[in-house]
Image (cartoon, rainbow, N blue to C red):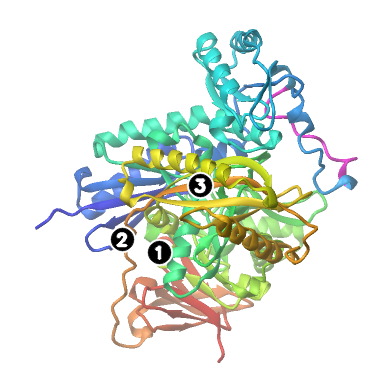
Amino acid sequence: MEPRRVRIGIDTGGTFTDVVAVDEATGRTTTTKTPSTPADPAEDFLTGVRKVLDLLGLDGGAVTAVSHGTTVATNQLLEGKLDRIGFITTEGYESVLEIARQSVPDGYGNSYFWVKPPRIVPADLVRTVRGRLDHRGDEVRPLDEDDARAAARFLRDAGVRTVGVCLLHSYANDAHERRVLEVLREEHPDAVVSISSEVLREYREYERSVTTLVDAAVKPRVDAYVRNIRERLDDIAPGVPFYVMKSNGGVLSAEEVVHQPITTMLSGPAAGALGAALVAGAAGFDRVLTCDGGGTSTDVTVVVNGEPALTTEGSVGAYPSKIPMIDVVTVGAGGGSIAWLSPEGTLKVGPRSAGADPGPICYPSGGSEATVTDAHVVLGRIPPHLLGGEIPLSVDAARAGLEQLGEKLGLDLERTATGILEISAWNQANALRQVTVARGLDVRDFTLTTFGGSGSLLACRLMDVLGLPRTLVPPDPGNLSAFGLLTVDVRNDHVQTTISRHADLDLDRVRTVFGELEARAREALDGEGFPRARQRVQRSADLRYVGQAFEVRVPVADGDLDGATVDQACQDFHAAHRMLYGYDFAEDPRQAVEWVNLRVSGIGPIRRPDLVELAPADGPVTDRAVTGSRPVFFDDWVETPTLDRPRLAPGDVVHGPAVIEEFGATVPVHPGFRATVDVHGNLLIERDAR
């Protein structure tokens, strides 16, 4: 008999680390969770690997690959824990970070009150060098190497070990930046350096500068974290391929990811969106809103035709980033989100979270501040334990904490708890509106897919608030992000700014640039071990109307690049512009179209796990799956049946009120709703016609 082989996906969150192993022969998955220790996420990773292998009765020799979603870079940026960074730029551009985009958040009416946040590099650590290229990359004035040496020595003597280099028009020609990098290596060999022509070959000096500086800032911590895991993973499964999730919906080997750490900024949320897209697509839904609720935050994305929306206008915390990333909106509304009183005496929820340590009041070592989880447990919406009994929850402690908060508000226990849940639901609803209504999409056309440990707890309320037709809850929703990691191809993105009006487009030049980008993409996939026959490349371009400040991305067809291909891309741009903004100039010859960036994505496909169909079961659902009942508060206290989700079978219908429980998640079905089980074990929640 052939030995069992498994692939493992591990997603490290702020509260729990989720683990999924898929059997490569049968496609069956095994899942588990372990509490996170934010001080040492690498230890959680290894604990998770050992735990799932013990469950399967296997050793490290059975593992064929490990994929990982990490929040190391994200958390460092959100918490603002950046070391001192040096910045080398072209003479005359020393204030590029100060000037930024000359915009004030919430408009100029806010300019009296807005305090400009500190720059990522203080003015005294910015150094300039003489030398100039034009926008085509032609040298106007040679690089002054004495300036470069002086800058390197200054940063070395100041004890600055992290440096970003962004010279004017280096997206068109990287010669000057490469020379500055050589000088830095000679004069300041201990420095960690990022140069913009390696991070982002795209115009817009401010965004390119900040993206490069963020890459440099997260490099030491991501490097140390990934190398630490790689060394310790070798003790369990020597030499096993180790992939890290990227923000663009692909993975990259750990060896490569340390050279481009900024690409991991939205590592975890991206995996969840892809896993949800796969599960919802198999269930027959191609327009999906994903809602990933964890202990600290909720991440939402929009999926159309099975593909999560991508953006290059994203940011993490205060730092804009132009790298391609899945368009995720994150809101501080998780199970651990703390309820607090504003100075005006009103109730607020989040974004501060009790996390895993100390955790909600009801946890064994819980904190002293009431959280969303405490509200759920007091109202009976979740059982008095988590992870199948691994973490007991104290209902009495949670009740005491909520009563204390309610006294300050003049509210009874039930109104305090439902108030906390209502605010949390509206926080999540507003995030879902940002990825739909704010993008010109009708939220009522979408199926909500909820997952994560806390993502499904408010599903029925979100359907009411947003007018959604249905909610899909995948099996084992708490581990869907880790499952998503096993569905992801290796992917690398390459971009080159090449500005030209459509009418004047030089096809030979476009062919040459696409050829260079494709060669770089294939070379990267060669290094990842993919034979040329299995590699795929996708071309796209950013277009705009002349005079516009921002572009719209459209696909560019494969095959020979001729006039018909670029004309089709232009027509696709008009259509995409109309969908996004409600108008276009397709019929107006006076309004010229401009090509701005050419892009190539190199894709190394992997084998996806099979979605296993559930076997039918005999007998009524009440005999098979009901485990008991407890009082649950919806609009009033009502004795509510509890059901064990693994015992449900295809075709089962559960009418609310009911609470469906499993190892890593709970789904309250409110009165007036019903949950139907499909062939893959998904719960489809809809309004009950009865």
Tell me the distance, in whole angstroms, between the alpha carbons under discs 2 and 1: 10 Å
Which of the two labelled residues, at mark 3 and mark 1, occupies the earlier sequence position? 1
Which residue corresponds to the image point at 63% horizontal and 34% vertical from the top-left?
Answer: 80
Mark 2 or 1: the one toward you: 2
Whether residue 600 is visible to the viewer of this picture, yes or no, is: yes
Name the residue nearer the viewer: 59 or 584.
Answer: 584
Label 1 near label 2: C-beta < 8 Å?
A: yes
Residue 185 in the image: state x and y as whole percent: 51, 14
Kind of residue sitting beneath label 3: Val
Q: Which is the main secondary structure of the residues drawn in magenta? A: loop
Mark drawn on residue 600: 3
Mark drawn on residue 529: none
For the record, the magenta segment spans 110-122
- How packed mark 2 is, by other alpha carbons closer than 10 Å (few <14, some 14-19, many 20 or more), is some
Whether residue 14 is visible to the viewer of this picture, yes or no, is: no
Q: Is residue 167 left or right of residue 490?
A: right
Which residue corresponds to the image point at 53% horizontal and 11% vertical from the top-left?
Answer: 188
Residue 648 in the image: state x and y as whole percent: 36, 77
**Which residue is tagged 1?**
476
Q: Quadrant of residue 255?
A: top left
